[in-house]
Image (cartoon, rainbow, N blue to C red):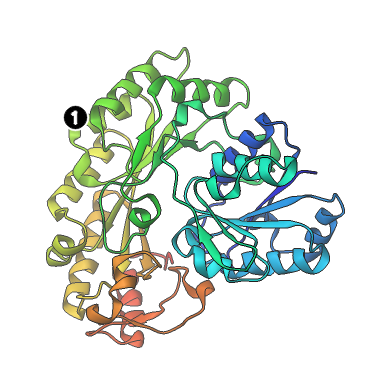
């Protein structure tokens, strides 16, 4: 075995969590396979973290193990890395994913971690495999890699430009237990992230504001593969902001409508990048679900952290319901400037959107590394109640603010959920 790719698991499973195929790892696997590498994939979010399975995997003598992690899963990624080094110290351990991208020096300071991939992993992992397995190339010239030199000094190479996504092979879905995923037919529609720079989101730190969409024709070709070969009946276009470019969206919609069979799909976007006409067009091309990030029901808070209006949110939800599209609206509690009064505004607005037909999701505001909230937490009056990364899960509260204690935050969440008639969807 040349390379094993591992998805590090969460510690707490959310009641509304849906297991989704790890597209990033599936893309890396596909590129490595195209290079002629033998690749295995393990998703511990499906099986649960089982160290015995790592031992069994090591019997196949992999040369490289790549581990993908978010902030919440970083501690489990380290557990996996340490187990690998204990059992097979000759194996090269590579960490990638959002947390390693944002805090590469922290990751490389761990003795069990040999390399860190910063940003996109496909080309970087392919070049690293060539260097480690074939002895060709120059480590100092591999863009997007972090490593330790002969003296143990940490070196971070320049990041590479975003790849042209149309040049990549389709994800190697066959390496994963597809029958166990609730969301297995996701399609990545763009490289990079959202161009907005919300202070609670780490996407700008991960992608540095860059975005490179796939061509509609390339997406359609993969969509046909999923429907005609795999028998998919629904797909989700996995992008933070699907409707950021309406001209591109409309071209994709036109091509979807030309398919010889109906398709059903969903997406995520912002309420200020859709209007009723676009929503009607999306419904006519098979869109059956849209996820909106609303975040707060206080216009003052929205002005400072999101840049949308409550009226835009109401119009978007009503347009979805009018055209037969299931929609959900997510909210975060609390923001640094939230008070009990502003949170009661959020409570009322959640009820308004719920009554208008939107599913509601609540999460706790979590200052992830790389966000403005994390980097400026002291001046914003945010007090972190833990220094354990596995606590950064947005499923329970880990902060206090200038205006709210931890107990008050939990009480307000219960009040909001109870008033809106929600399950506590955190």
Question: Residue 68 location in percent, x, y?
Answer: 58, 55
Question: Residue 355 location in percent, x, y?
Answer: 25, 54
- Mark 1 Cα-neighbour bin, 10 Å: few <14, some 14–19, many ≥20: few
Please give left or right for residue 322 compared with residue 63 in the image: left
Say above or below: 353 vs 224.
Answer: below
Instruction: Name the image quarter holding the C terminus.
Output: bottom left
Residue under the image location 24 percent in, 36 percent down? 322
Instruction: Name the image quarter holding the N terminus.
Output: top right
Say above or below: 330 vs 400.
Answer: above
Residue at the extreme front of the image, as rendered: 151
Residue under the image location 47 percent in, 65 percent down? 103
Name the residue nearer the viewer: 236 or 88: 88
Residue at the extreme right of the image, as rendered: 59
Q: What element does badge 1 sit on?
A: helix
Name the residue nearer the viewer: 355 or 295: 295
How many circles with numbers are drawn on the protein? 1
Please give left or right for residue 81 compared with residue 119 in the image: right
Can I make out residue 21 in this image?
no
Can I make out residue 311 in this image?
yes
- The residue labelled by disc 1 is 277
Question: Residue 90 location in percent, x, y?
Answer: 79, 59
Q: Quadrant of residue 31?
A: top right
Question: Residue 22 location in percent, x, y?
Answer: 57, 47
Q: Quadrant of residue 394?
A: bottom left
Name the residue nearer the viewer: 166 or 18: 166
């Amino acid at each position: 075995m040349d390379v094993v790719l591992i998805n590090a698991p969460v510690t707490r499973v959310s009641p509304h969590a849906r297991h989704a195929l790890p597209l990033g790892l599936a893309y890396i696997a596909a590129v490595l396979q195209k290079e002629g590498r033998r690749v295995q994939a393990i998703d511990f979010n499906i099986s649960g973290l089982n160290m015995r399975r790592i031992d069994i995997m090591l019997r196949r003598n992999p040369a490289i193990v790549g581990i993908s992690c978010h902030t919440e899963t970083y501690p489990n990624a380290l557990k996996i890395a340490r187990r690998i080094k204990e059992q097979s110290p000759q194996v090269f351990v590579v960490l990638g994913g959002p947390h390693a991208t944002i805090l590469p020096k922290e990751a490389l300071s761990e003795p069990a971690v040999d390399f860190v991939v910063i940003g996109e992993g496909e080309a970087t992992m392919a070049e690293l495999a060539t260097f480690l397995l074939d002895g060709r190339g120059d480590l100092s010239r591999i863009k997007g890699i972090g490593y330790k030199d002969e003296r143990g000094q940490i070196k971070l190479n320049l990041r590479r430009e975003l790849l042209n996504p149309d040049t990549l092979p389709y994800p190697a879905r066959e390496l994963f237990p597809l029958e166990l995923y609730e969301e297995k037919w996701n399609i990545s529609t763009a490289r990079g992230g959202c161009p907005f720079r919300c202070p609670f989101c780490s996407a700008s730190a991960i992608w540095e504001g860059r975005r490179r969409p796939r061509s509609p024709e390339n997406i359609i070709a993969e969509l046909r593969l999923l429907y005609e070969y795999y028998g998919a009946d629904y797909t989700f276009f996995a992008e933070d902001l699907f409707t950021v470019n309406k001209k591109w969206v409309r071209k994709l919609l036109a091509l979807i409508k030309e398919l010889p069979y109906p398709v059903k799909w969903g997406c995520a976007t912002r309420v200020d990048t859709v209007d009723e006409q676009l929503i009607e067009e999306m419904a006519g091309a098979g869109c059956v679900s849209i996820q909106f990030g609303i975040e707060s029901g206080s216009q003052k808070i929205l002005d400072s952290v999101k840049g949308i209006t409550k009226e835009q949110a109401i119009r978007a939800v009503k347009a979805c319901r009018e055209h037969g599209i299931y929609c959900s609206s997510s909210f975060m509690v609390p923001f640094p400037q939230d008070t009990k009064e502003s949170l009661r505004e959020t409570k009322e607005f959640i009820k308004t959107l719920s009554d208008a037909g939107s599913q509601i999701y609540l999460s706790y505001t979590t200052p992830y590394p790389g966000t403005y909230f994390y980097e400026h937490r002291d001046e914003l009056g945010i007090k972190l109640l833990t220094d354990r990364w596995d606590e950064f899960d947005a499923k329970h509260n880990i902060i206090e603010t200038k205006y709210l204690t931890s107990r008050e935050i939990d009480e307000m969440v219960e009040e909001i959920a109870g008033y809106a008639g929600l399950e506590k969807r955190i």
